[in-house]
Image (cartoon, rainbow, N blue to C red):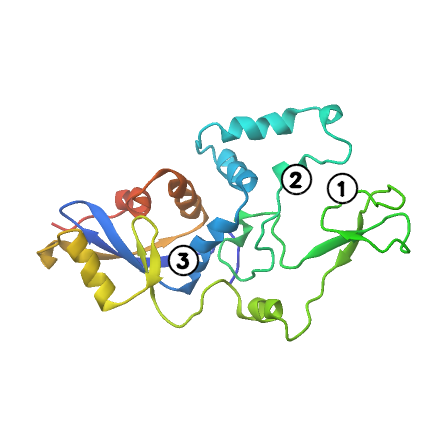
């Protein structure tokens, strides 16, 4: 799937029109992959994304700006500000996730570095600012990791994403994700004391990068994420 800003995902929402809230959504693999991808985003990346869209997220933008504006002379010689401002995701091997460009430093392959001074110094690092323990030169020569054809990582890359494309998933308003089932649906309706199914309304919503960022922001702030992001866009039937 493309990761451009034109990418659109869709979910089917079940809405309680009386309470004006989303009870849960039916979502396919691509939506669940995106939601799970949020967990892999470093705090620095989340802060940068929300800051660029002028979305408030507490004091983190101030902390981010402090690092940005700090003169390099105050930074340790073996450190780099990009470690904080452009952090790498721990899920760098996962591919084919919608809106993967939410993490603009995420790569689809592992990258390692060796000594820039001598190829005879047999040490590697995943940080280009590290110093060679033999000669103290920067370990900035790029080495590319190649997974063997039968490795689990190669299989994951070929399949793409986090979850299997074998069924529909249920996503509740507070972002609990589980395989969709009739029993789970009935249990949730009982939980919210829904006695009259006439008050329920189904609505298919599509969303792109802007809504994806709103979901990202709401996931840090709210227990009713789907309601917060989508209810204002839906015309409730009377």
Instruction: Give percent across and percent down for residue 171.
Output: 32, 56
Secondary structure of the residue carrying numbered label 3: strand
Alpha carbon of mark 1 to alpha carbon of mark 2: how far?
9 Å
The disc, 3 or 2, on the residue closer to the chain's N-terminal end is 3
Badges 1 and 2: C-beta atoms under 8 Å apart?
yes
x, y percent for residue 101: 55, 51
Residue 83: mark in rendering: 2
Label 3 and label 1: CA atoms lie apart by 38 Å
Q: Residues within 10 Å of mark 1 (few under 14, many from 20)?
A: some
Q: Residue at x 77, y 43 (%)?
A: 130
Left or right of 28: which side holds 159?
A: right
Above/below status of 119 relative to 79? below
**Nearer-the-camera pick, 212 or 171:** 171
Q: Secondary structure at mark 2?
A: helix
Q: Which image quadrant is residue 95 in?
A: bottom right
- Residue at which label 3 appears: 9
| Contact (Cβ within 8 Å) of mark 3 with mark 2 | no
Q: Earlier in the sequence, mark 1 or mark 2?
A: 2
Circle 1 SS class: loop
Q: Is residue 152 left or right of residue 138?
A: left
Residue underneath mark 1: 129
């Amino acid at each position: 799937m493309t990761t451009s800003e034109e990418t659109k995902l869709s979910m089917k929402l079940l809405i309680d029109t009386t309470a004006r809230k989303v009870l849960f959504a039916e979502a396919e693999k691509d939506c669940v992959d995106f939601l799970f991808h949020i967990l892999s985003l470093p705090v620095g990346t989340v802060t940068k994304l929300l800051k660029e869209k002028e979305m408030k997220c507490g004091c983190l933008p101030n902390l981010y700006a402090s690092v940005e504006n700090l003169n390099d002379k105050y930074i340790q010689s073996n450190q780099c500000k990009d470690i904080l401002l452009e952090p790498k995701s721990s899920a760098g091997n996962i591919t084919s996730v919608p809106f993967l460009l939410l993490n603009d430093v995420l790569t689809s392959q592992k990258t390692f570095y060796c000594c820039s001074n001598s190829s005879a110094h047999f040490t590697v690092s995943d940080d280009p600012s590290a110093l060679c323990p033999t000669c103290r030169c920067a370990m900035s020569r790029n080495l590319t990791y190649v997974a063997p054809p039968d490795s689990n990582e190669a299989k994951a890359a070929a399949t793409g994403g986090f979850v299997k494309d074998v069924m529909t998933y249920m996503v509740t308003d507070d972002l609990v994700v589980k395989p969709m089932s009739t029993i789970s649906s009935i249990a949730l309706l009982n939980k919210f004391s829904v006695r009259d199914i006439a008050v329920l309304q189904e609505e298919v919503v599509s969303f792109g990068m802007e809504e994806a960022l709103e979901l990202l922001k709401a996931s840090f702030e709210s227990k009713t994420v789907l309601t917060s992001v989508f209810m204002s866009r839906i015309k409730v039937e009377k």
